Image (tube, rainbow, N blue to C red):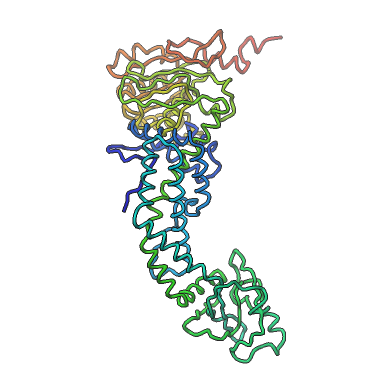
C-alpha cells in the first residue's frame, strides 16, 4: 500500500513534535486567531491542533513556509481546491465512514461506497489538473503533484475507473421497485415483499391508485391475489424523521412512497420479510435491502466483489490530506486580506545555529490587528535573543505594552514554525521545541492553593518541562504576594531559567529585579540576563522597548495618576 503523503509533516528522520498546552494556547490568543480564519467549528479545531503542534527542527519550518508561499501566491489553487472540498461528500467530511464490504452489507451501502469511489476518481483527476496548470515551487507541493500523478497512472486506478463506470451504468438502470404488503385481520402490515425491479420511475397515474380509496368501496376489494389492473399508483412522501409504524401506511397515506398493494400477487416467501411488531418506518430500508439483495443477486455480488478490491483506497490516499490544505488555505486568505488592509507580514528565516536565537525587526502583536487596531496606530518594535540576551526582565509603566510585547513574541514563533508569514518586517529565529506561558490564572483556578501557591505550582510544572530550546513567557508572575516575597521567588526563578539557558521574557512591576541584572549574571556562567524597558517619553507611554536599566518610575504612582487618586488630583479644587 502506498504511504500517505503530507504537506505539513515531511518524512524527515529524527523529528519530534510537542503539543502546546491549552493554557498556552489561551495566553497566546490562539482561539481568537482561529476564529478570524474560519467560522466552521470543525476547521477551527483542526487549524488549532495543527499550529499548536510544533517541532524545533528548522527543516520542518522551511518545508511548511515554502508550501504556504505557493498557496498564498496561487489564488487559483485555493479556489479550485475549496470547490473540490465542497463538491465531494467524502472530502467534505474529511474522510469516509469506512465500510467493510462483506456479506453483511446490502445494496444500499454498496451503492454509497461506489459513489465515494467515484468521487475519489474525480477528485484525483481534478487535483492532477489543478497542480499541472499552476506553477509551484515548494518541495511539498511538487511532491504532492508527483504523488497524485503516481496514483493516476497506477494500474489499479485505471482499472478501478473502468469498474466503477461499469457498475454505475448497471446500477443506474434501477429506477423503481414494486412492493407488496400483506396484512392481518386487524388490518396491520405483517410482511413486505418485492414484486419487481423496474428501469422506469412510476408516474402518478399507472399501476396503483389511492389505497384508501380502493378500500372505501367494498366491491373494489379484490378476491384473491391476482392483480386485475384497476388500482393506480399514489406516491406519498416518507417523513425525514422516519417516525411512525409501517402499519400506519394503511390508515394514513402520508408514511411511505412505494407502490403498496395488500396481498400482491407474486410475493413469495423467498422475497418477503417479516415486519416485527412495533417497528417504525425507519427500518423499512433494512427490510427492502434484504429483499432487493435477493432480487438483484448478480448485481450485488458484482458490486461487493469489485468494491472489495478498493476497500481502503479512499481513506489512505486522499481524505487525510484535506485538513492540511484547509490549514494553509485559511491562513493564506487571512494573510492576503490583512496585507491588502495595510498590515505588515513577512517570510521568516529559520536558523540552525545558536548565534542568532531570534532577531525580530518591526514586529507587532497580531492580536491588535485582530481586534481592529489599524496598522498606522500600531507601534512596532525590535528584539533579539542571543548568547548575551537570553533572558529579559521587562519593566515599564502600567498599561505600557509589556504584556503586548510578551504575547507578541510567542505568536511570532507559533506562526513561523507553522509555516505562516509573521507580523514583522523581518524575522530570523532558531525554532523552539515548545512554548510555555505563565500568565495570571483565572480566579476559580486559585481557590484550592491560593494565588501564590497556584503560581508556584504552575511555574514549577513549566520549568520541569522546558529545555534550552524552549521559550518561556512570564507575565506579572509572583506579584500576588508582598513585594519582598514575590521578589525572592522571582529572583530564584530567573536564576534557575538562566541555568537551563531558556529563552525568556519576564515582564514585571518589580523593577528591582531588573536593577539586579549584574548580580544575577555574576552568580552564574550560563545564559545572560538583560533588562528590557518600555520607554517613557516625558511621562507618556511610547510602547517602544529598549535594552536598558529600569527607569525607576513609581508604578503605583502611575496607576494612581491613571485613575485620579494622587493627593493633588483628589484635592484639586478644595
Residue 365 makes an appearance in the image = yes
* Residue furthest to the bottom: 223
Query: Which corner quadrant holds the C terminus?
Result: top right
Query: Which corner quadrant holds the N terminus?
Result: bottom left
Residue at position x 44%, y 50% in the image: 125
User: At which x and y percent is residue 458?
Assistant: 40, 32
Q: State the image quarter where residue 226 is shown.
A: bottom right
Position above or below: 92 against 280 = above
* Residue furthest to the top: 538
Residue at position x 32%, y 18% in the image: 387
Decide which of 235, 537 is in the foreground and name it.
235
* Residue furthest to the front: 133
Position above or below: 448 against 153 = above
User: At which x and y percent is residue 340?
Assistant: 56, 28
Decide which of 216, 487 is in the foreground and name it.
216
User: At which x and y percent is residue 565?
Assistant: 62, 15
Asked whether, in this view, residue 74 is left or right of residue 559, the answer is left
Residue 574 makes an appearance in the image = no
How many numbered marks have been drawn onto this rendered protein structure? Answer: 0
User: At which x and y percent is residue 142?
Assistant: 38, 39
Amino acid at each position: 500500500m502506498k504511504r500517505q503523503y503530507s504537506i505539513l509533516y515531511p518524512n524527515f528522520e529524527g523529528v519530534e513534535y510537542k503539543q502546546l498546552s491549552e493554557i498556552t494556547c489561551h495566553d497566546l490568543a490562539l482561539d481568537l486567531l482561529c476564529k478570524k480564519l474560519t467560522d466552521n467549528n470543525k476547521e477551527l479545531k483542526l487549524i488549532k491542533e495543527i499550529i499548536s503542534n510544533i517541532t524545533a527542527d528548522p527543516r520542518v519550518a522551511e518545508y511548511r513556509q515554502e508550501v504556504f508561499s505557493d498557496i498564498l501566491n496561487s489564488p487559483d489553487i485555493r479556489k479550485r481546491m475549496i470547490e473540490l472540498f465542497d463538491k465531494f461528500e467524502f472530502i467534505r467530511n474529511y474522510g469516509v465512514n469506512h465500510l467493510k464490504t462483506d456479506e453483511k452489507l446490502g445494496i444500499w451501502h454498496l451503492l454509497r461506497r461506489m459513489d465515494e469511489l467515484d468521487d475519489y476518481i474525480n477528485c484525483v483527476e481534478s487535483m492532477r489538473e489543478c497542480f499541472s496548470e499552476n506553477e509551484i515551487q515548494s518541495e511539498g507541493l511538487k511532491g504532492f503533484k508527483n504523488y497524485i500523478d503516481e496514483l493516476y497512472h497506477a494500474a489499479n486506478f485505471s482499472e478501478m475507473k473502468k469498474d466503477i463506470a461499469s457498475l454505475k451504468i448497471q446500477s443506474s438502470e434501477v429506477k423503481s421497485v414494486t412492493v407488496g404488503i400483506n396484512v392481518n385481520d386487524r388490518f396491520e402490515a405483517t410482511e413486505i415483499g418485492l414484486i419487481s425491479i423496474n428501469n422506469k420511475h412510476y408516474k402518478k397515474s399507472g399501476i396503483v391508485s389511492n389505497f384508501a380509496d380502493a378500500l372505501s368501496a367494498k366491491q373494489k376489494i379484490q378476491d384473491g391475489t391476482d392483480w386485475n389492473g384497476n388500482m393506480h399508483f399514489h406516491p406519498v412522501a416518507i417523513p425525514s424523521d422516519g417516525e411512525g409504524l409501517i402499519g400506519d401506511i394503511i390508515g394514513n397515506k402520508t408514511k411511505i412512497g412505494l407502490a403498496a398493494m395488500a396481498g400482491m400477487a407474486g410475493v413469495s416467501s423467498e422475497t418477503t420479510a417479516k415486519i416485527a411488531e412495533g417497528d417504525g418506518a425507519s427500518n423499512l430500508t433494512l427490510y427492502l435491502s434484504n429483499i432487493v439483495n435477493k432480487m438483484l443477486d448478480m448485481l450485488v455480488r458484482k458490486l461487493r466483489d469489485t468494491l472489495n478490491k478498493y476497500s481502503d483506497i479512499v481513506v489512505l490516499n486522499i481524505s487525510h490530506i484535506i485538513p492540511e490544505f484547509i490549514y494553509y488555505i485559511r491562513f493564506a486568505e487571512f494573510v492576503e486580506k490583512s496585507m491588502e488592509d495595510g498590515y505588515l507580514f513577512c517570510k521568516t528565516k529559520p536558523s540552525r545555529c545558536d548565534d542568532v536565537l531570534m532577531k525580530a525587526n518591526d514586529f507587532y502583536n497580531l492580536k491588535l490587528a485582530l481586534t481592529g487596531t489599524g496598522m498606522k496606530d500600531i507601534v512596532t518594535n525590535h528584539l533579539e535573543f542571543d548568547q548575551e540576551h537570553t533572558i529579559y526582565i521587562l519593566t515599564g509603566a502600567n498599561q505600557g505594552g509589556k504584556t503586548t510585547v510578551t504575547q507578541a513574541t510567542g505568536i511570532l514563533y507559533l506562526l513561523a514554525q507553522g509555516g505562516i508569514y509573521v507580523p514583522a518586517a523581518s524575522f530570523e529565529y532558531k525554532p523552539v521545541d515548545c512554548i510555555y506561558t505563565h500568565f495570571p490564572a483565572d480566579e476559580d483556578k486559585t481557590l484550592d492553593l491560593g494565588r501564590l501557591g497556584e503560581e508556584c505550582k504552575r511555574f514549577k510544572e513549566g520549568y520541569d518541562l522546558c529545555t534550552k530550546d524552549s521559550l518561556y513567557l512570564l507575565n506579572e508572575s509572583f506579584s500576588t504576594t508582598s513585594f519582598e516575597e514575590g521578589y525572592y521567588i522571582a529572583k530564584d526563578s530567573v536564576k534557575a531559567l538562566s541555568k537551563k539557558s531558556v529563552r525568556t521574557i519576564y515582564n514585571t512591576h518589580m523593577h528591582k529585579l531588573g536593577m539586579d541584572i549584574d548580580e544575577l549574571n555574576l552568580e552564574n556562567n550560563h545564559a545572560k540576563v538583560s533588562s528590557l524597558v518600555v520607554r517613557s517619553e516625558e511621562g507618556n507611554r511610547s510602547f517602544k522597548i529598549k535594552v536598558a536599566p529600569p527607569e525607576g518610575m513609581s508604578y503605583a504612582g502611575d496607576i494612581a495618576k491613571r485613575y485620579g487618586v494622587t493627593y493633588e488630583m483628589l484635592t484639586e479644587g478644595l
